[in-house]
């Protein structure tokens, strides 16, 4: 008998209903009832991972400790559950096919025709069960990307059908997230799209155990009865998910609706522990009752996309709550930062220069650094943002004309940022960056030490280029210090300008480690500095 219980979350009617947030909120409730829970995302696209995708396609690429480049939903899972995810938490169709085709070439299926059923579905099932088989989790929640009815998600739905059959009713349940739209002209909520979506799911042999219905208006009793009758779902298992002010309200809304109770009942699980969400609600009180406001400029080239810098935006929210201050984020397009820098950045209490790849908009990023440095505005450079800070300093303080990163200009006379040695022989783009968690040794007399209060830290990376140590001496003497270095390789991970109120650049991505219960210390200190310098 399996010990681990499985919950599948599918989506119907439209995309962008927030399956990730519902999965994370449910997981939070189950976790605070004493169960150990993890969440996995299955993505039906053929890319092996989202590392090669442009943020315009799927938003931010999230990175795990073990170096997986993953879907941004994993960021929500970590922020809600406060436990790290891993390679096994994100599976794509690309990964499934790659494994099956490699096995075929090896001869593992010798003599057999390799087919979607059973070979692809078996591999999907294997990937779903990997987390359960670690023995670490009572419950594994698997979110299936896309919308029911998509051609590309069919093998996943079939794998769910088979798993329910293999594992038995109370060991694997399906939650279907749908939309109940409100027709303003008719002044009515409409159930038909949900009915159709459930029908679609049933045609694939899967009956939802629970419906979570996204809605702008409360579902009344008759709507719930109608949905129950036509969708073959018990009325108590029709859960309203009304629009929330913030994603962090959703666990409380789901608790009120009793989603966790229905889930435990269906899974035949009992517990004496009530999900109190104590620490979570302490965060919410601070988050919702700020004593002050600060204005932060986020300079990047994808700022028109709300998902491109998801983890940075959430980290600012966590750090704001910790400081009891509301953080207003101003999206500043780096391509538009030319001669107008002072007007565009006027009135900001702090400036972040975002991560990124390629040369589009980088001169604007350098201009933003220049403005923050010269005007003593707290500055936080993340990955590419840190690299831009080094370039700005080299150009304007060391007067190294046309100093650059070799990513932007291979022929720069002063390659202050250069391709890492181990990257020089790499030709394939997928999964070949310096990825995942690496150690960094921090100098005691620094702003970052004040934040971390520790000399050895571990942070997640995703880059190919790096501070060029040939310029370390020159830069240090001129006032830009390397305050954090990888102890094994000597790679510079952190730079600071000690004479500036708060000027920190990090080669890594602190935003991947900020959670509701553990706001990231660098974001917390940055916000504190912005407040002090207001
Ligand atoms: N493009 C830079 C590099 O590869 C920075 C990457 C990033 O910001 N994540 O080093």
Image: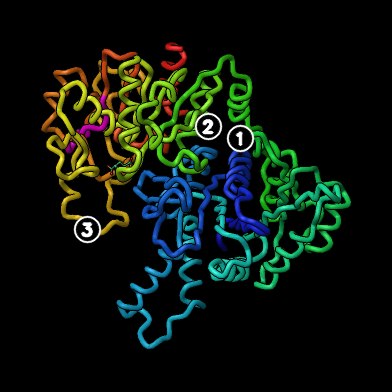
Q: Main secondary structure of the magenta part?
A: loop
Rate crowding at label 3 as few (under 14), some (14 to 19) or many (20 or more) other CA atoms within 10 Å: few
Rendered image: mark on residue 248: 1
Which badge, 2 or 3, is on the more N-terminal residue?
3
Which badge, 2 or 1, is on the more N-terminal residue?
1
Asked if one can make out residue 291 in the rendered structure from this viewpoint, the answer is yes
Rate crowding at label 2 as few (under 14), some (14 to 19) or many (20 or more) other CA atoms within 10 Å: many
**Which residues fall within the magenta stretch?**
486-495
Asked whether mark 2 and ligand 1 are closer than 8 Å, the reply comes as no
Q: Mark 2 points at which residue?
A: 516
Q: Mark 3 points at which residue?
A: 427
x 79%, y 61%: residue = 192
Q: Are the residues flagged by discs 2 and 3 in contact, CB closer than 8 Å?
A: no
Q: Is residue 493 magenta?
A: yes
Q: Are the residues flagged by discs 2 and 1 in contact, CB closer than 8 Å?
A: yes
State the separation of the CA atoms marked 2 and 1. Answer: 9 Å
Instruction: Answer with left or right where residue 384 lies relative to residue 423.
Output: right
In the rendered image, the quadrant that contains the N terminus is bottom right
Q: Are the residues flagged by discs 3 and 1 in contact, CB closer than 8 Å?
A: no
The correct choice, above or below, for 283 with respect to 224 in the image is above
Q: Position of residue 386 (x, y in %)?
A: 30, 31
Q: Helix, strand or loop at disc 1?
A: helix
Q: Position of residue 158 (x, y in %)?
A: 58, 71
In front here: 267 or 350?
Answer: 350
């Amino acid at each position: 008998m399996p010990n681990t219980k499985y919950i599948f979350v599918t989506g119907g009617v439209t995309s962008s209903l927030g399956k990730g947030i519902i999965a994370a909120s449910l997981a939070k409730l189950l976790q605070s009832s004493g169960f150990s829970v993890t969440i996995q995302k299955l993505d039906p696209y053929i890319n092996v991972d989202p590392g090669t995708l442009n943020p315009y396609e799927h938003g931010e690429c999230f990175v795990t400790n073990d170096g997986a480049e993953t879907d941004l939903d994993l960021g929500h899972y970590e922020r809600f559950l406060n436990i790290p995810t891993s390679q096994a938490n994100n599976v794509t169709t690309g990964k499934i096919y790659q494994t099956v085709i490699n096995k075929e070439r090896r001869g593992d299926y010798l003599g057999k025709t390799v087919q979607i059923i059973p070979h692809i579905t078996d591999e999907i099932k294997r990937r779903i069960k990997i987390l359960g088989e670690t023995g670490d989790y009572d419950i594994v929640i698997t979110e299936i990307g896309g919308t029911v009815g998509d051609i590309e998600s069919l093998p996943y739905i079939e794998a769910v059908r088979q798993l329910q059959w293999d594992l038995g009713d109370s060991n694997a349940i399906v939650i279907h997230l749908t939309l109940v739209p409100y027709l303003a002209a008719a002044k009515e909520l409409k159930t038909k799209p949900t009915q159709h979506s459930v029908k679609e799911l049933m045609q694939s042999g899967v009956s939802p155990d629970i419906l979570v219905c996204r809605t702008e208006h409360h579902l009344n009793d008759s709507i719930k009865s109608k949905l129950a009758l036509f969708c073959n779902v018990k009325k108590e298992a029709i859960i309203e998910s009304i629009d929330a002010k913030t994603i962090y309200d959703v666990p409380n809304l789901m608790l009120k609706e009793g989603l966790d109770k229905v889930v435990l009942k269906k899974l035949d699980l009992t517990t004496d522990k009530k999900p109190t969400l104590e620490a979570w609600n302490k965060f919410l009180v601070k988050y919702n009752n700020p004593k002050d406001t600060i204005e932060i400029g986020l300079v990047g080239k994808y700022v028109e996309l709300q998902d491109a810098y998801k983890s940075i935006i959430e980290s600012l929210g966590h750090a704001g709550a910790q400081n009891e201050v509301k953080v207003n984020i101003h999206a500043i397009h780096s391509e538009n930062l030319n001669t107008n820098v002072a007007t565009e950045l006027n009135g900001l209490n702090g400036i972040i220069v975002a991560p990124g790849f390629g040369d589009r908009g980088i001169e604007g990023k350098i201009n933003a650094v220049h403005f923050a440095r010269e005007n003593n505005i707290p500055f936080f450079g993340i990955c590419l943002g840190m690299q831009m800070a080094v370039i700005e300093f080299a150009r304007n303080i060391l007067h190294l004309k046309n100093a650059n990163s070799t990513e932007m200009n291979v022929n720069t006379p002063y390659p202050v940022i250069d391709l890492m040695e181990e990257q020089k022989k790499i030709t394939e783009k997928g999964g070949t960056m310096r990825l995942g968690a690496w150690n960094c040794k921090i100098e005691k007399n620094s702003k970052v030490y004040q934040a971390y209060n520790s000399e050895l830290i571990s942070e997640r990376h995703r880059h190919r280029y790096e501070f060029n140590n040939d310029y370390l001496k020159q830069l240090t003497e001129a006032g830009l210090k390397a305050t954090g270095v990888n102890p094994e390789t000597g790679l510079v991970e952190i730079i600071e300008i000690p004479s500036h109120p708060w000027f920190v650049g990090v080669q890594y991505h602190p935003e991947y480690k900020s959670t509701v219960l553990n706001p990231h210390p660098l974001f917390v200190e940055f916000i504190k500095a912005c407040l002090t310098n207001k």
